[in-house]
Amino acid sequence: MSITLSGGLPTNFVSEFTRDVEHVCQRDKALLETAVKTVPISSEAKSFDMFDEMDLVAKEGRNPPTPRNDVTTGRRWVESDPYHNAYQFDKDDDLQLLLDPAGETVQGLKNGRNRKVDDIILTAFEMTVKSGRRSNSSTVTWAGQNGNVKYTEASGGRTIPHDCAEGNCAAGDVGMTVEKAQLVLEYFQMNNCNMNEPIYGVVPPRVATQLFGQEEYSNVDYNDAKPLAVGRMLKSWAGINWIQHTGITLGSSNDVDSDTDVYECWFWQPSGIILAVADTYSVRITEESTLSFAQQVYVHMNMGVMRRNEDKVVKVECQAG
């Protein structure tokens, strides 16, 4: 039964709808949103300083001069950008659909918001980061930080190639393997990262399928979660929290040697990626007099992302086969 309203949408209806949308968004966040460090931001740009390693030196003799050293820091900037949209409902539409907390409108707004958040976060891994005393003074690129260098025990590279022959990897294992997962863990250990901080990895469905072909993944002798029985990708395996996402697509000659089509799968620790949020989500409902007094739902959010520390991010290449 339709709701007939005169004089606009009552305030309590607006408040109820807004709370419903916010509740649904908080209950079911974007896939990547909980895997990064979220910070509030109240301006267009916010800076983050990183300190270089600090060491101690031997104290020689009695009452030696006090050592004097300046602290080396690196400043990076994250910028927040607004996103919005509006949807109109005719006065003769069934407004119960609009107001239902489990209705298609609420779910649609939630899904759209979460997709956009994931899209924003996925840009962080290879993005050009603004750095320096001011946000426009210099930049840091992924490639410039050895991001396009093959990882070995001593190379400092940040890409585990599809044909990796490092550690336990065999060059012929071009998809996602347990050996590559082991190298991911080794990478963070080699960079002296805090191994008590969780490690996340995002892979496309084809790479998730490759995991089911790994004996250490599907065999109950190694894993009592039985992924083949439940038919779903494990959320936690081999010390990594796995996220399946369709936003990662097969590239064209995009491997580290620029001659093979690969999926670029990313692994990181939350403190390595910053999500700055000025407005996580807001909703307003108004009457549009120029559109036959249609009810308009206006949605808005404001956020930005930054790669804070390359030592906490690594890329793994996987072929589709």
Image (cartoon, rainbow, N blue to C red):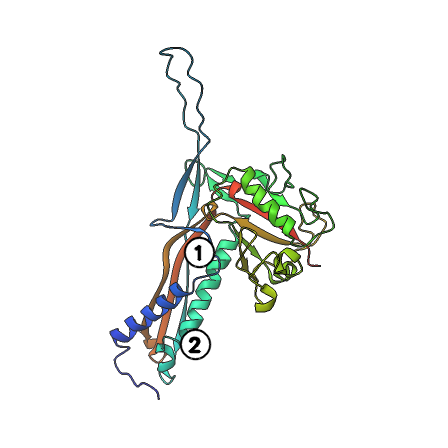
Q: Residue furthest bottom?
A: 1
Q: Is residue 102 visible?
A: yes
- Is residue 229 left or right of 290 when viewed as pictured? right
- Up-down relation of residue 132 to residue 307 (above or below): above
Q: Residues within 10 Å of mark 2 (few under 14, many from 20)?
A: few
Disc 1 target residue: 34
Q: Position of residue 71 (x, y in %)?
A: 41, 28
Task: Give the residue displayed 35% in from the left and 67% down from the top.
Answer: 23
Disc number for residue 319: none
Question: Looking at the image, how many numbered discs can be counted on the residues?
Answer: 2
Could you say which disc has been placed on residue 104 in the image?
A: 2
Q: Label 1 sits on what residue type?
A: Thr
Element under disc 2: helix
Above or below, 311 against 5 in this view is above
> Which quadrant holds the C terminus?
bottom right
Residue 287 image point, x, y percent: 31, 75
**Could you say which is closer to the camera, residue 43 or residue 316?**
316
Q: Is residue 32 above or below residue 271?
A: below
Query: For residue 141, what is the image quadrant?
Result: top right
Question: Whole-percent x and y of residue 254?
Answer: 66, 51
| Res. 231 image quadrant | bottom right
